[in-house]
């Protein structure tokens, strides 16, 4: 069977990556329809060796498609996803609009594939925050083996997570500094070039930011509501690739050797952990890869049953586009192929 797939927000960073991943993984499509706002009508995007022209979101009849991959932001998703779902297409939404709704499954296929069975309540499936996706992929096999009690995570997030304009801002500021021009900023509250900004999203009354809150609540929803999670988000001058320093406390004893072996066997993970110069993965090396990389696995001697590790992934892929396509593959395997058989 093959399926008609629409990609909303096809001209953005994640939308383009969705088209790339659909092609690379040879998702069974009969047609791919790129959609965007009216100002992008007719704009060309690539799908494999084909060039497709964007159509206007407002004028499109969603009753003609099977799957809609939504990557146009929360406001657009809140307006369109319920309407699309009622027309029969299944929406896989990359925004935060529906992640914490009790009747919308939040899915990372390597972590909680069974949750997808609840998709039909609203025909909406949520894709998690980019940092959460790579985190829970690494946590899942360890939680199954020794039960995680507490997670302390610090993220080092690339500017692509904020969008193309943020990537342009990093480039322009870097160039300005190198040639002695004034540094201008419009996306971030402080200079991002040659700097680190401990701020992601909006500040909440608790002192946490919304990006930190997402890491907490999404991890609990997908993995285990009993896990205690503390998160600090920082934006770093990296174009693509999110890094995370993760400290874990377990209920049961687990050695670093055991953790390394479990992670090597787990789906979606690649362990690169040599205790030598360069024996770890950095964001530069993960770009374009499907895997979540884990390095620097070691015992934390300050607590009982503690481990620390370093987790890196391409945020435009596993953190967004790849995970969305994997959800679509899971949806086809468990539901759509049977419905159309």
Image (spheres, rainbow, N blue to C red):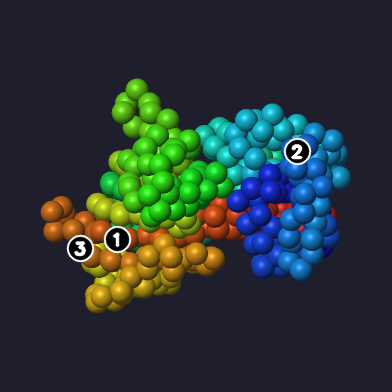
Q: Secondary structure at mark 1?
A: strand
Would you say residue 161 is visible in this rendering? no
Question: Residue at point 31% right, 74% down?
Answer: 279
> Whole-Å distance between the Cαs marked 1 and 2?
44 Å
Please name the residue that numbered disc 1 is placed on: 309
Residue 234: image location, x then y, percent: 35, 45
Residue 25: image location, x then y, percent: 66, 67
Marks 3 & 1, CB-CB < 8 Å contact? no
Question: Residue at point 60% right, 54% down?
Answer: 321
Question: Residue at point 79% right, 64% down?
Answer: 50
Residue 81 found in image quarter:
top right
Q: Nearer the viewer, mark 2 or mark 3?
A: 2
Whether residue 56 is situated above or below residue 327 in the rendered picture = above
Residue 92, label in figure: none
Q: Nearer the viewer, mark 1 or mark 2?
A: 2
Whether residue 307 is situated above or below residue 128 in the rendered picture = below
Q: Quadrant of the C terminus?
A: bottom right
Label 1: few (<14), some (14–19) or many (≥20) C-alpha neighbours in 10 Å: many
Would you say residue 197 is visible in this rendering? yes
* Mark positioned earlier in the residue sequence (3 or 1): 3
Residue 51 found in image quarter:
bottom right
Residue 299, label in figure: 3
Looking at the image, the residue that sits furthest to the top is 205
Front-lying residue, 39 or 216: 39
Residue 15: image location, x then y, percent: 65, 50
Whether residue 294 is situated above or below residue 53 in the rendered picture = below
Please name the residue that numbered disc 2 is placed on: 39
Front-lying residue, 268 or 141: 268
């Amino acid at each position: 069977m093959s399926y008609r797939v629409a990609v909303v927000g096809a001209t953005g960073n994640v939308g383009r990556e969705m088209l790339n991943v659909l092609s690379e993984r040879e998702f069974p499509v009969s047609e791919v329809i790129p959609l965007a706002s009216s100002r992008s009508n007719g704009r060309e995007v690539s799908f494999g060796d084909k060039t497709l022209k964007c159509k206007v979101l407002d004028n499109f009849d969603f009753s003609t498609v099977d799957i809609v991959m939504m990557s146009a932001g929360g406001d657009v998703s809140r307006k369109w996803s319920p309407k699309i779902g009622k027309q029969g297409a299944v929406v896989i939404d990359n925004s935060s609009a529906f992640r914490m709704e009790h009747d919308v499954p939040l899915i990372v296929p390597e972590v909680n594939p069974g949750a997808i069975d609840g998709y039909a309540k609203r025909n909406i499936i949520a894709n998690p925050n980019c940092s959460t996706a790579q985190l829970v992929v690494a946590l899942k096999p360890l939680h199954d083996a020794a039960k995680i009690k507490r997670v302390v995570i610090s993220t080092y997030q690339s500017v692509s997570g904020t969008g193309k304009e943020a990537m342009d801002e990093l480039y322009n500021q870097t160039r300005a500094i190198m040639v002695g021009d004034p540094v201008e900023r419009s996306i971030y509250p402080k200079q991002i070039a040659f700097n680190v900004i401990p701020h992601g999203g909006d500040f909440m009354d608790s002192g946490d930011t919304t990006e930190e809150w997402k890491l907490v609540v999404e991890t609990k929803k997908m993995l285990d509501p009993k896990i205690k999670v503390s998160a600090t988000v920082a934006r770093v001058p990296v174009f693509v690739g999110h890094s995370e320093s993760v400290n874990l406390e377990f209920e049961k004893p687990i050695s670093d050797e055991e953790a390394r072996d479990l992670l090597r066997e787990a789906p979606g993970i690649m362990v690169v952990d040599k205790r030598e110069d360069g024996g770890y993965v950095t964001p530069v090396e993960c770009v374009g890869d499907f895997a979540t990389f884990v390095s620097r696995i070691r015992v934390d001697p300050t607590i009982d049953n503690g481990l620390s590790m370093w987790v890196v992934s391409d945020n435009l892929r596993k953190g967004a586009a790849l995970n969305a396509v994997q959800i679509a593959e899971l949806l086809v395997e468990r539901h759509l192929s049977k419905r159309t058989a």
